[in-house]
Image (spheres, rainbow, N blue to C red):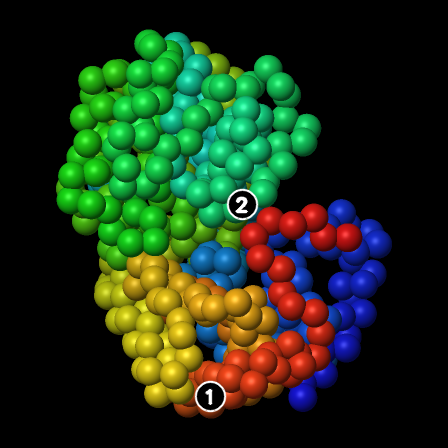
Amino acid sequence: MVSTKKGQEMYDIARRLIPGGTQLLSKRPEMFLPDGWPSYYAAASGITVTDLDGNTYRDFAIGGVGATVLGYADQCVDNAVKAAIEQGSMSTLNAPEEVVLAERLTDLHPWADMARFSRAGGEAMAVAVRIARTHARRATVAVCGYHGWHDWYLSANLAKDDALDGHLLPGLDPAGVPRGLEGLTRPFQYNDIDTLNSIVSGCGDDLAAIVMEPASDSDPDAEFVKGVREIANQTGAVLIFDEITSGFRLTTGGLHLTLGVDPDIAVFAKALGNGYPISAIIGRREIMQAAQNTFISSTSWTERIGPAAALAVLNKFEKEMISDHLIEIGQRVKQVWLEAADHTGLKVAVSGLDPLAHLEFLGDSAPAQRTLFTQEMLGRGFLAGPAFYAMAAHMPDDVADYADACREVFGLIASAASTGSIEGRLRGPVAHSGFKRLT
């Protein structure tokens, strides 16, 4: 049994000082292993994480919530950041790296002419929507997927409490979002063009933007994304691809490059900086210039570290074919889950894009099975849960060791399930699912 006492003690303090205990829902210990998750790290390098109690784990979970696509403390990126710090990370003048980064991103995406930068994904999406509304001189936005915490997005739940339930975070309460925004953001379903057509019919000439993730848990139907592009053309709406999670996983640049459909704006974050804050909004000149007609500005968007990190990430992706490695590792992990389930008779479902794989335990005791999986894998030296985000630092030998542990733990879960003793094997409560208020 692994002791995570120091991490738990710090989390107890955090819950008294920080609303919700953490800055990010996805990092709350209750989402993984209540009363047992390490919670905090002392050091991280490659795929190895050391907790406050001195335990080391190989991370086969969400890899910095998808941000550290190369691995923790990547030397190439860290060296670029250290150089930026030594040269001065902030000045009255502008950092030239942002111009170079704009050139690199528009070169990777020939349809795009201009770029703006921020430092987080949610704020970048807010920037993109503001630009689109300014350009179109309209207000209504159609959305498909998860796009952050800002008012423009959560306002979809003002009209109907479960409007966003199909968009990754069920149960989101739009408390604090002004009631006057009701009806301005309307969700449609992935791979269902009819739900988008319904929005178009219902909002008349007021559709400013169509915002979507170009791929969800799986590749789109052959004509879906093309159909969305056609509707944008017909209505004059700005097509925005949210590539915050999908970008740089299947190719160097946006996933949409593999689909043959160009948006009007694309938004990147997470993998772009390998853990350093940087986000990018790239787009067509005639649309991006609308940023000049509204107020979009922040002091922190002018610091040097984010662009320097992003340039180092781009260099490594292009030189080392990182996306090919991410795909291969993700495919191997999916196969590990399927083979372990087949070997033990455990019922599971495996889904997701290869570098963003998802594992679902099936049956009435599924939440408890998922919690037991995390608990037992932790004891075997792995951070693990219902999702695996591949990093370049994951090596085949790591996957082989993970496979051995999975077979053993799947067998334990199958045995406990057959006797109805899943929760009896847990050393704490069952992990939370989706969005829940945590106190």
| Circle count | 2
- Mark 1 residue type: Gly
**Residue under the point 60% across and 85% down:** 379
**Residue under the point 31% across and 28% down:** 196
**Residue under the point 16% across and 39% down:** 223
Please state the horizontal and vertical placement of residue 13, each as a whole percent of the image.
Answer: 83, 61
Q: Is residue 8 visible?
A: yes
Q: Nearer the viewer, residue 236 or 108?
A: 236
Q: Can residue 54 be seen in this view?
A: no
- Image mark for residue 411: 1
Q: Is residue 314 above or below residue 172?
A: below
Q: Is residue 241 above or below residue 140?
A: below
Please state the horizontal and vertical placement of residue 375, each as a whole percent of the image.
Answer: 60, 78
Please state the horizontal and vertical placement of residue 110, each as a whole percent of the image.
Answer: 19, 37
Quadrant of residue 320 in the image? Answer: bottom left
Taking 178 as reference, is 199 left or right? left
What residue is disc 2 on? 170
Quadrant of residue 235 in the image? Answer: top left
Dot 2 falls on a residue whose secondary structure is loop
Q: Is residue 28 above or below residue 232?
A: below
Estimate the spatial distance between the alpha carbons at disc 2 and disc 1, rounded to whole Å. Answer: 31 Å
